[in-house]
Amino acid sequence: MVSAASLLQYVLPAQHAGIPIEDMCNIIGVEPSALYDLEAYYPAPVVYELAREVVNRLGDEYFWLKAPSPELVPTNNLFFYILFQAQTLFDFMLRAERLYNYFTDEVSPSHRLIDDHYFYLANFHRPESEVSPYRVDWWFSITRLSATLFAGEQYKMTEIYLSSPFNSRREVYEEYFQVPVRIDQPQIAVYVPRSNLDLPNIRNLCDPQLEKLLMRQLKGRAHGKSQSNDFLEKLRDILRQQLPNGTPNLDAIASQFLMSPRTLQRKLSEDGTNFSEQVRILRSQLATQYLGQSEFSISQIAFLLGFQDSRSLTVAFRSWFDMTPSEYRQRNAT
């Protein structure tokens, strides 16, 4: 699900490029006034459909890479306002990780500190083969732009990491961002010098009391979304417990919610997903988590994920990440 505020981040650049806002609302099936309903949430595919249609109308495959511009980063938008209340770039990045949880459950950025560098990872919740390349374009571009607006030109990206579904964008990315791009990576990420994390806020917009008030309001507005998230989290907890017993059964899981399989599927459909997708997402997330722990063998991981044997895990893992579990573990260790 994505919030109306997140949806606006796609509508405004397209409107700036000359596409009437009414046309875009027709594409995604909402009234223009709904875009400003702070309590409204929409299925993630709505964003993908809008991004694709805008590219088709403008005839520019890389529109979403070039779309972010300073005047289209609205500091009166609650998401960006709270981001720009941070004191340092590290605080800025941590806030972004938290805020994404309020505005969307489509992607959950995270960070990793390794030696003298900082990794900022996208973590899209859908299988990467289903993630729109335009969504990836936007994520990289808006991440760099907002960090530059926060910290100034001292902010530098060292490298960009692309996973295999997006390898074809390498040359364009290298030309646009002027940094090396690594392909066939386990995850989509930005590679930044660790020293950047201490960069101060050049805007000096900090108002701690106002920020506390806004965060309380934001949590209240996210209540409806959190109910949906609570259901999905409960489902994933149950699935996680069932995985060692084999591939989870829809009928058995539905019975634990005291509902019919049909009702469970309908409820998931309202959240823009389905039972099989939730099993696939959980398995792929747990697989990368377990592979990062050297005490688990590939066979043990296959068991924990409900596969019959390590070969079945390898086939599934290759479909998710275009590499084997062993290759992923070796690259991640490197």
Image (cartoon, helix red, strand yellow):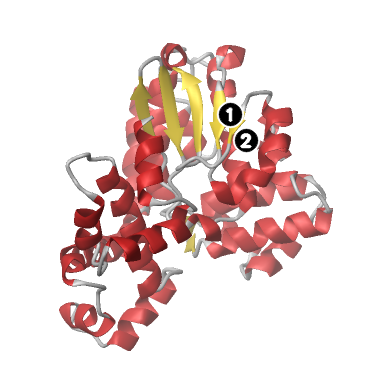
Instruction: Classify residue 183 as left or right of residue 111.
Output: right
Q: Quadrant of residue 174?
A: top right
Label 2 neighbour load within 10 Å: few <14, some 14-19, many 20+ = many
Query: At 58% from the left edge and 51% from the top edge, which residue is drawn?
Result: 165
Residue 212 appears in the picture as rendered? yes
The label on residue 278 is none
Would you name the residue on which mark 2 appears? 141
Q: Nearer the viewer, residue 234 or 34?
A: 234
Dot 1: element:
helix
Q: Quadrant of residue 73?
A: top right
Query: In the rendered view, would you say 171 is above or below 242?
Result: above
Image quadrant containing the N terminus: bottom left
In contact (CB < 8 Å): disc 2 and disc 1: yes
Query: At 68% from the left edge and 42% from the top edge, which residue is drawn?
Result: 169
The image shows a total of numbered marks equal to 2
Q: Position of residue 267 (x, y in %)?
A: 36, 77
Dot 2: element:
helix
Q: Nearer the viewer, residue 15 or 43?
A: 43
The residue sitting at the front extreme is 311
Would you name the residue on which mark 1 appears? 144
Q: Position of residue 117 (x, y in %)?
A: 42, 19
Instruction: Classify residue 30 as left or right of residue 323.
Output: right
Instruction: Identify the amino acid type marked 1.
Output: Arg
Query: In the rendered view, would you say 250 is above or below 172?
Result: below
